[in-house]
Image (cartoon, grey):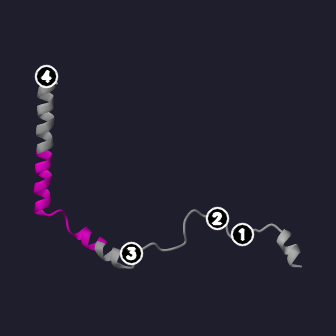
Amino acid sequence: HADEDASLPHRPGAPASPVAPVQAGGGGAAELVAAEERRTGPGTAQGVTGLALAGVAAVVVALRGLRRGRGTD
């Protein structure tokens, strides 16, 4: 009887799914870290650094525009 069962096509009980049925969490620590990050915004140091980088970028763009306007590029 085992040979007869081997010749029958296998039919899965549920259709195949590309989504794994597991929880891919961080063991509970990820929720705590995410909650802490949501409560705090960027600090003063990050704000000053961002403004400084934006200022440098603006100066570079302005200087490149002046050089192209004079035809020295």
Tell me: residue 62, above or below residue 11. above
The residue that disc 1 covers is 12
| Pointers 2 and 1 in contact (C-beta within 8 Å) | yes
| Pointers 3 and 2 in contact (C-beta within 8 Å) | no
The residue that disc 3 covers is 26
Q: Position of residue 62 (x, y in %)?
A: 12, 33
Quadrant of the snapshot with the N terminus:
bottom right
How many C-alpha atoms fall within 10 Å of the one at disc 3: few (<14), some, or many (≥20)?
few
| Pointers 4 and 1 in contact (C-beta within 8 Å) | no
Of residue 62 and residue 1, the one placed in the foreground of this image is 1
Quarter of the image holding residue 57?
top left
Rendered residue at 88%/73% (across/down): 4
Q: CA distance from mark 4 to mark 1?
A: 71 Å
Please, what secondary structure does the residue beneath circle 1 have? loop
In the rendered structure, the answer to whether residue 16 lies left or right of residue 41 reads right
Of residue 67 and residue 30, the one placed in the foreground of this image is 67
The residue that disc 4 covers is 72
Residue situated furthest top in the rendering: 71
Tell me: residue 50, above or below residue 65. below
How many C-alpha atoms fall within 10 Å of the one at disc 1: few (<14), some, or many (≥20)?
few
Quarter of the image holding residue 26?
bottom left
Specify whether residue 6 is painted magenta. Answer: no
The tag earlier along the polypeptide, 3 or 2, is 2
Of residue 11 and residue 39, the one placed in the foreground of this image is 11
Please, what is the three-letter code of the amino acid marked with disc 2? Ala
The residue that disc 2 covers is 16
* Span highlighted in magenta in the image: 34-55
